[in-house]
């Protein structure tokens, strides 16, 4: 089996060495970059399975800007590194297209667990939905092609956003608890990370709902979970 390749972007030489050495020891391939411009050039010329991206980078592109630009041409999963634990920074990262984040300082064990979890949900084991597609009003989820359309136009989703919508679509009309949805998409180690789910539900609503503040597709059962409206 081909080893997964990972690009690490950070301007701290010591951290780059630490992360790279441990990824190599864990069976991954790893390259490094120290600024956003170089990272974008490498991503345009080389196919990577995962990007580990620091927010604070020198030059014209910080981590948020790099992530936004990447999402214009790639759905590569992104783990953002941040020295700030503020909620607005996490939300900004998710809005830019990040799949996960780690707050500095972090342990090698935590990093490797996050890498494994992100790669797992990027290449999930297939389930068997009720049919080739879910459809309600102007929303269509094509399970066979892993594509989503609203009013006939394709909606660009990250791998994690699609997984959230996929599981809701496979169980349309049924409430999936917060813990169950987190476990299905992120893994059992994330089952209490409710802010992850809230951020992704918010992001999905912005992309597929006419009025994200008054959704008609992705609905909430307060304090319990979420569900997708029934097919019509």
Image (cartoon, helix red, strand yellow):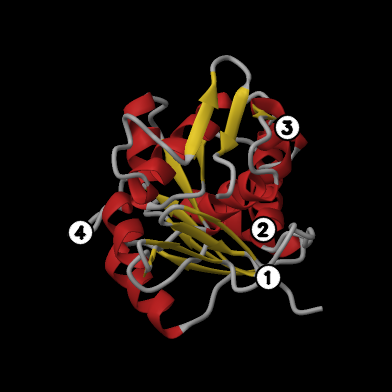
Question: Which badge, 1 or 2, is on the more N-terminal residue?
Answer: 1
- How far is disc 1 from disc 2 in space, using C-alphas? 9 Å
Q: Which callout, 2 or 4, points at the residue further toward the start of the chain? A: 4
Given contact means CB atoms under 8 Å apart, are the residues at marks 2 and 4 in contact?
no
What residue do we see at 73% from left, 37% from top? 183
- Frontmost of labels 3 and 4 is 3
- Element under label 1? loop
10 Å crowding of disc 1: few (<14), some (14-19), many (20+): some
Asked if marks 1 and 2 touch (Cβ < 8 Å), the reply is: yes
Mark 3, secondary structure of its residue: helix
Which numbered mark, 1 or 2, is in the foreground of this view?
2
Q: Nearer the viewer, residue 138 or 8?
A: 138
Residue farthest front in this picture: 232
Label 3 or label 2, whichever lies nearer to me, is: 3
Q: Earlier in the sequence, mark 3 or mark 2?
A: 2
Label number found at residue 180: 3
Residue at the spot of label 2: 119
Write the residue at 76% across / 66% down. Answer: 27
Residue under numbered circle 1? 4
Which label's residue is closer to the chain start, 1 or 3? 1
- Mark whose residue sits in front, 4 or 1: 1
Q: Nearer the viewer, mark 1 or mark 3?
A: 3
Residue on which the image places disc 4: 59
Give the residue drawn at x 68%, y 70%: 4
**Distance Cα–Cα, label 2 vs label 4:** 29 Å
């Amino acid at each position: 089996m081909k080893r997964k390749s990972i690009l690490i972007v950070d301007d701290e030489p010591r951290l780059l060495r630490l992360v790279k050495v441990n990824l190599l020891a864990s069976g991954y391939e790893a390259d490094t970059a120290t600024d956003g411009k170089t990272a974008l050039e490498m991503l345009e010329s080389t196919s990577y399975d995962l990007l580990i991206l620091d927010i604070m980078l020198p030059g014209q592109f910080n981590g948020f800007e790099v992530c936004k630009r990447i999402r214009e041409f790639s759905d590569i999963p992104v783990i953002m590194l941040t020295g700030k634990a503020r909620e607005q920074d996490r939300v900004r990262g998710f809005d830019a297209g990040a799949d996960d984040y780690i707050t500095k300082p972090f342990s090698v064990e935590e990093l490797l667990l996050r890498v494994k979890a992100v790669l797992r949900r990027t290449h999930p084991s297939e389930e068997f939905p009720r049919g080739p597609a879910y459809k309600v009003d102007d929303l269509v989820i094509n399970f066979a092609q892993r594509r989503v359309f609203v009013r006939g136009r394709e909606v660009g989703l990250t791998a994690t956003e699609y997984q959230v919508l996929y599981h809701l679509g496979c169980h349309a009309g049924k409430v999936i608890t917060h813990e169950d949805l987190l476990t299905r998409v992120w893994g059992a180690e994330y089952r209490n990370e409710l802010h992850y789910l809230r951020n992704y539900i918010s992001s999905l609503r912005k992309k597929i709902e006419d009025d994200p503040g008054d959704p008609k597709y992705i609905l909430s059962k307060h304090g319990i979970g979420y569900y997708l409206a029934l097919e019509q």
